[in-house]
Amino acid sequence: MKLPNKILTGIFLTLLISCDSLEDKKGRFLLKGNEKLEENDPKSAIEFYNEAIALDSTYADAYYNKAMAHLRLNQLEETIADLSKAIQFRPDYFDAIFQRGLSYLDNGEFYKAREDAERLLKLDSNNWKSYFLTGLSQEKLKNLPEALKAFEKASSMEPANSDLLVNQATIHYYQKEYNLAKEILSKAETINPSEPNLHNLRSMILFDEKDYSGALSSVEKAITLDNRQAYFYNNKGLYLLFLQKPEEAITLINQSIQMDSKNPFAMRNKGIYYVMQGDKISALQYLEDLIKNYPDMDLLQEYYQKAQAL
């Protein structure tokens, strides 16, 4: 007996669906998640990645991509948890280890970041990212010579990367080696004149050299190139304080605090503002806690003493 075409078609579709493999199904959810991430819709992307993980709880790529979606939402704990899952199921997942190391740094877990850097070096000692993460973690742990050595190694492997030169210049800046830092920044500028951190770091050097107008000009260039960085506005506020423009300065410092309430340098700058205004109570409110937790911070001792003397 001949079956009607419509019935045959229905049977054919059913067979196709039933033959759809697990790999195909979870792969489709991964792709849909990726599409949502490209559309800057990380919440919807996470839903699709969760569907993929529901089909395969060991799907390392889904955990990795889900972590990147959480990162877009600034959800560091969730980012680290998903990256750890990806690494659990694929111990040699280089990109996941690298991104987890960066996330640990953002989360203030510097020793864990260094552990991930060491893991990367064992996995691939010929990849500049291994040395980059090493340098970042050593910098946070105040091991400046080790950090500089790692950044120099990374830069030798990736000479066209201006960020790596800026990192080297930053270490020289911390070590008060301003001429060396400026030389490296000039080299970085020939590679990428639109790197905002380059101009911000130059502004910090100029400020330390008491060229406040030059510092202001450089940080304004950094803000023009990237207006999302709280510390750029904080630095601009500091320079305006020393250019005797306190009301413009405090507006920018407050803006910086709204963008990032955890930046101790912004609290220091607010304390400096109140010292300059002769407001002892408000100045000490900001500077007393800082002096306990960040006794070596530039300008802090000087302005804490000035606040006490008011």
Image (cartoon, rainbow, N blue to C red):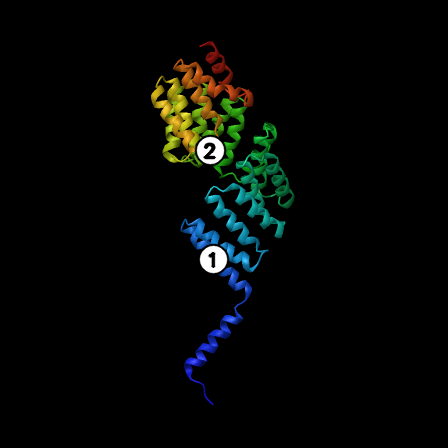
> Where is 205 relative to 97, above or below?
above
Check the image and report above or below for 50 versus 136. Answer: below
The type of residue carrying mark 2 is Ala
Give the amino acid type for the residue marked by disc 1 in the picture: Leu
Residue 82 visible in the shown view: yes
Q: Label 1 neighbourhood size at 10 Å, few (<14), some (14-19), many (20+)?
A: some
In the shown orientation, is residue 57 left or right of residue 261? right
> Which residue is pictured at 57% across the width and 53% down the height?
60
Name which of mark 2 and mark 1 comes first in the sequence.
Answer: 1
Q: Tell me residue 303's x, y (percent).
A: 47, 15
Of circles 2 and 1, which is in front?
A: 1
Q: Residue furthest bottom?
A: 1
Which is nearer the eye, 197 or 49?
A: 49
In the image, is residue 301 above or below residue 255?
above
Provide the secondary structure element on which disc 2 rests: helix
Quarter of the image for the C terminus: give it. top left
Instruction: Tell me where residue 84 appears, x and y as whole percent.
Output: 59, 46
- What residue is pinned by disc 1? 31
Q: Position of residue 159 (x, y in %)?
A: 51, 38
- In this rendering, the count of numbered labels is 2
Determine the residue positioned at 41% across, 22% down.
238
What is the residue that sits farthest to the top in this orientation? 309
* Residue hosting label 2: 188
